[in-house]
Image (cartoon, rainbow, N blue to C red):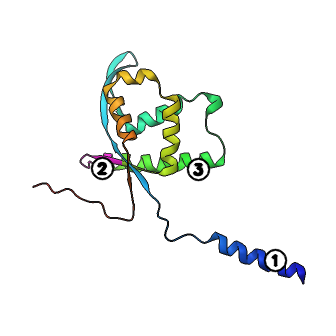
Amino acid sequence: MVIRQNQKFIKRRSKRNTHKNPKRKKKLKKIEVINWKEPEMVDGQMQDVKYDTMKILSLLINFVPPQDQPKGRDNFKLMAKINDAFTKVEEHIDSGAEPPYYLFLEDNEYQFFRNLYDKFVPAAWGRSKKITEALEKFEDAETVDPNEPEKKEKTE
């Protein structure tokens, strides 16, 4: 009887603690994506290579030393969610939509990149105006509520 009472207590308690708080709303970081081309040597020939904010953020991950690379299941899932966010923007750009383009990241995804940016951004990137502009747009990300309709500016 005592065991049953304890089991009921544990069951009741777990149900009570697992409900989601309806008042808590998930916020997103809205980052303006810029894209540009830079001439680079590819296979012995000068070619214009496409860059954008997402490519710069991806390259930032490559600059993390191997011993500091994020590991584990949680980071694996985080990277999958970031890849999905990048893919949505790329599909939007490829569809021929007019700029501006926006990347939406959840707070933990944004903080992941922010931590990498604060610790591992190559100082030499400061010599490129476009990379600097892309990273400034990343820094200036606006916090938005995904449940609210986007406010449109009047252009009259």
* Amino acid residing under circle 1: Gln
**Residue nearer the viewer, 107 or 40:** 107
Three-letter code for the amino acid on which mark 3 is drawn: Lys
Graded by Cα atoms within 10 Å as few (under 14), some (14 to 19) or many (20 or more), the crowding at tag 1 reads few
Q: Residues within 10 Å of mark 2 (few under 14, many from 20)?
A: few
The tag earlier along the polypeptide, 3 or 1, is 1
52 or 140: nearer the viewer: 140
Q: Position of residue 56 (x, y in %)?
A: 42, 33
Going by the picture, which residue comes out furthest to the left?
Answer: 156
For the point 33% across and 50% down, the residue is 92
For residue 5, above or below residue 45: below
Q: Which residue is mark 2?
A: 95
Whether label 3 touches label 2, CB < 8 Å? no
Q: Specify the label residue 7 is tagged with.
A: 1
Q: Of helix, strand and loop, which one carries label 1?
A: helix
136 horizontally vs 14: left or right: left
Q: Between disc 1 and disc 2, whose residue precedes?
A: 1
Query: Is most of the magenta stretch helix, strand or loop?
Result: loop
Q: Vertically, is 86 above or below 68?
A: below
Q: Residues within 10 Å of mark 3 (few under 14, many from 20)?
A: few
Label 3, on which residue? Answer: 77
Asked whether 95 falls inside the magenta stretch, the response is yes
Q: Which residues are magenta?
A: 93-102
Judging from the image, what secondary structure is the residue with disc 3 in?
A: helix
